[in-house]
Image (cartoon, rainbow, N blue to C red):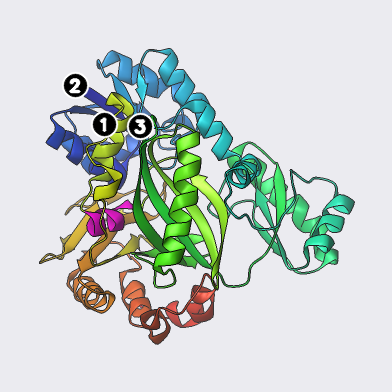
Amino acid sequence: MIQRILIANRGEIAVRVIRTCREMGIETVAVYSTADKDNLHVKLADQAVCIGPPPSAKSYLVKENLIMAALRTGCQAIHPGVGFLSENADFARAVQKEGLIFIGPDPDVIDLLGDKVQARNTAKKYGLPITPGTEGAVSDPAAAIAAAEKLGFPVIIKAAAGGGGKGMRIVRSAAELPENLTIASREALANFADGTVFIERYLENPRHVELQIIADGKGTVLVLGERDCSVQKRHQKLIEESPSPGVDESMRNRMAEGAVRMFRELKYRGAGTIEFLVSGKDFYFMEVNARVQVEHPVSEFVTGVDIIRQQILACTEGKLEIEPSSVRLNGWSIECRINALTPGKVSRLEVPGGPGVRFDSFLYNGCTVPPHYDSMVAKLIVHGPTRERALARMNRALQELVIEGIKTNASQQRWIINHEKFRSGQFGTAYYGEIEKEVEHVH
């Protein structure tokens, strides 16, 4: 067992990793920008190292500073968390070059799966259905129009190197395509330093469903059920649940069979997520996130597996504590992301509790939420024996949650989960857009 890990991240995910490391008897080293010097992850870690000023490009994204901090504090491994450098193959290679363990997949696997064009081809190779689209990147407007007309409008332009809605444009006619191709490529270049884009047929209002996997790099692949992430605001997830109301046992098994086949052949190591679009009884491969996901707690609730613990064991010792045959889904779990609508100082925080309630956050009374980073400040997760019971528990927990000093979307989340359409379970990725005007008036 390794003795010390550096966590190359901040906020909620850094706190999450620290807690599991402490249970495993592993010391932790936090890194922080000057804006985060009083962040909870800094307070909880055994050591902390300042790595630069607030802008991410001068702190959390500076590979050399992170690696130097790990070496100077005697760490044996680096956990990248989510976002930032968590799927950066060059960072993973630099970590390994210094004799440190990167808690994630092999850099070559990250490269293969991080490029969406290559990932599509890989999924197809292992028998997973893919959304009809271009075989490779497109840059010429005339070729793009020809490809789109062959696919049939509407189509979607996607960045090959990124996600989160950046470099993504929906196009409904040939006349709109050249301008949107330029915009998407420009966005992709600005956000991911890679302007490569490709085109897929756009599926109207599909469900967004993902499988949580953990693999040991030697052929053992755990599938920890699926999560439904269809409630999204401009491609940013708001609410996740497991299992999905739109996936039956047959589809779940077919998804899992393809995922296991692909991750096993790739000798994948660590935690990962394979994402699908579900339309009716069909599903299509979308992408792989070669890291732990923000929404991993719902899978932990329904399986009882500590995903961070298994991720660390897989990457540092090449083993898992769980056999695939022992994984069972139990009950229903729902997560609401609590986003800050304004930065500022938290003057009052009251955290919900009771059976089946979990609050993952970096907030505490008197802490400051800086304006420099992602708006998510907490995740409220509940578990119940059925979806109806889990929804009742989430409704109660959101009523108990008090965050003062900053504005959050907690009231809006409560409104969404009590909406008739959400309660029915019959919705897709267009759901938030259908209710957005009503949601925006909730305070």
State which region is magenta: 295-303
Q: Is residue 272 left or right of residue 116?
A: left
Residue kind at label 1, given as amino acid type: Leu
Residue furthest left in the image: 354
| Residue 368 in picture, x, y percent from top left | 27, 49
Q: Earlier in the sequence, mark 1 or mark 2?
A: 2
Q: Which residue is under mark 1?
A: 313
* Labels 1 and 2 touching (C-beta < 8 A): no
Which numbered tag is attached to residue 8?
3
* Labels 3 and 2 touching (C-beta < 8 A): no
Camera-side residue: 35 or 102?
102
State how far apart marks 1 and 2 are (Cα): 13 Å
| Residue 208 in picture, x, y percent from top left | 49, 63
Mark 3, secondary structure of its residue: loop
Instruction: Please tell me whether mark 1 or mark 2 is closer to you in this view.
Output: 1
Residue kind at label 3, given as amino acid type: Ala
Does residue 355 appear in this view?
A: yes
| Residue 244 in picture, x, y percent from top left | 39, 67
